């Protein structure tokens, strides 16, 4: 009896034909709850869309909203065969250095004079190439300056297809990482690269030749406005040729950027503005 009572209680709870209640609520009560949730979720979706819309309005396609405060840009070298920062080869074994010249060929192709003439402008050297937006009027796309491959002279791979590797006078190419808005020199002084040997190797490094002259990054390549604003930007390069480096020994070399307004090697990043690598040229058969 009691069991029967419980069962009918349950049944009645699910559907009570007397009061016409389903799960304890009438149809209109259920309808109101449903209506409430529908409105509530539409409201949430609307709020989300509005927030996104407002956020996206504040973004600019052509420059990052947030950028780490500029300290010192990193430097990289080419050829860099792997992660080790070692250039080791034997001048008598073509296969030990031809990968280096291949990397340089590939790296320098976009700098071919013909391509540069197509894509970029001949700018006035020794001054910044400013192309600022005037208020809300965007000055896009922005032009970029030519960096011709021939400016690397003996390290351009044009006259000397092997970049000096086969005669033990190899070229290394250095570039500075891109930093949007960086103005790397004060008072018209362009930043320049210098390379030297680590202490114990100082008598092994021999004479160096820099291209362009003095190893400068001309001011006309700055400021950089970002990938979207300055589509054809070619990073300026500096090539270093080792004219009389000691062979059959490891030589540890460090190159750094010298600029009168960017500090090198601050506490936060000891490797900022400098790059180290090992160069070893073997001459044994
Ligand atoms: C770039 O120049 C090099 C050397 O002169 C040449 O071998 C190569 O074919 C050129 N590449 C393009 C894409 O123009
Ligand atoms: C780069 O090379 C092109 C084609 O040879 C030449 O017209 C242009 O003047 C050169 N630009 C610079 C900055 O030397
Ligand atoms: C980028 O280079 C292409 C040719 O490759 C040229 O048509 C275009 O005008 C250049 N754009 C800018 C902004 O310099
Ligand atoms: C290279 O540096 C020397 C000495 O600092 C200077 O006299 C010379 O004009 C510079 N050359 C170039 C092409 O900037
Ligand atoms: C090359 O370096 C050696 C010492 O490593 C030196 O004796 C020699 O005079 C140098 N040659 C030139 C042309 O500078």
Image: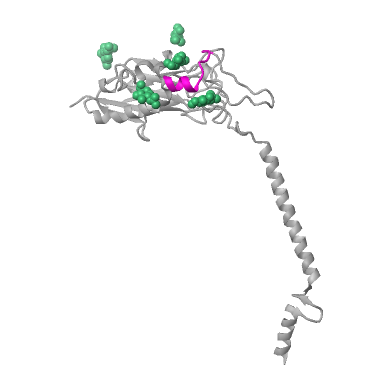
Q: Residue furthest left?
A: 285
Question: Was residue 243 drawn as part of the magenta stretch in this picture?
Answer: no
Rendered position, 187 above or below 92:
above
Rendered position, 195 above or below 19:
above
Residue 38 lies, in percent from the top left, at 74, 59
- The residue positioned 63% from the left and 33% from the top of the image is 60
In the image, the segment drawn in magenta is 113-126
Q: Is residue 112 left or right of residue 140?
A: left
Question: Was residue 115 drawn as part of the magenta stretch in this picture?
Answer: yes
Q: Is residue 52 left or right of residue 101?
A: right
Q: Is residue 26 left or right of residue 112?
A: right
Rendered position, 75 above or below 241:
below
Residue 216 lies, in percent from the top left, at 46, 16
Q: Quadrant of ligand 1?
A: top left
Which quadrant: the C terminus?
top left
- The residue positioned 42% from the left and 13% from the top of the image is 213
Q: Residue furthest bottom?
A: 1
Task: In this rendered view, identify the residue nearer to me: 120 or 163.
Answer: 120
Count up the numbered dots. 0
- The residue positioned 78% from the left and 76% from the top of the image is 21
């Amino acid at each position: 009896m009691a069991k029967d009572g419980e069962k009918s209680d349950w049944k009645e709870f699910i559907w009570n034909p007397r009061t016409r209640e389903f799960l304890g609520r009438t149809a209109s009560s259920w309808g109101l709850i449903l209506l409430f949730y529908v409105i509530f979720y539409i409201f949430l979706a609307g709020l989300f869309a509005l927030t996104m819309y407002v956020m996206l309005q504040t973004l600019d396609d052509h420059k990052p909203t947030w950028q780490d405060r500029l300290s010192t840009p990193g430097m990289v070298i080419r050829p860099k065969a792997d992660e080790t920062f070692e250039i080791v080869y034997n001048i008598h074994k073509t296969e030990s250095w031809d990968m280096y010249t291949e990397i340089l060929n590939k790296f320098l192709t976009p700098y071919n004079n013909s391509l540069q003439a197509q894509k970029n402008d001949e700018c006035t050297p020794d001054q910044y190439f400013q192309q600022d937006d005037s208020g809300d009027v965007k000055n896009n796309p922005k032009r970029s300056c030519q960096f011709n491959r021939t400016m690397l002279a003996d390290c351009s791979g044009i006259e000397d297809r092997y970049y000096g590797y086969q005669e033990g006078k190899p070229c290394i190419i250095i570039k500075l990482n891109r930093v949007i808005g960086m103005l790397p020199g004060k008072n018209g002084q362009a930043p320049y690269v210098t390379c030297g040997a680590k202490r114990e190797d100082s008598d092994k490094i021999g004479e160096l030749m820099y291209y362009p002259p003095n190893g400068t990054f001309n001011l006309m390549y700055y400021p950089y406005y970002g990938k979207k604003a300055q589509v054809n930007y070619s990073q300026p390069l500096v090539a270093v040729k080792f004219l009389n480096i000691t062979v059959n020994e490891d030589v540890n070399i460090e190159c750094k950027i010298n600029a009168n307004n960017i500090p090198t090697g601050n506490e936060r990043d000891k490797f900022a503005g400098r790059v180290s690598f090992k160069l070893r040229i073997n001459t044994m058969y």
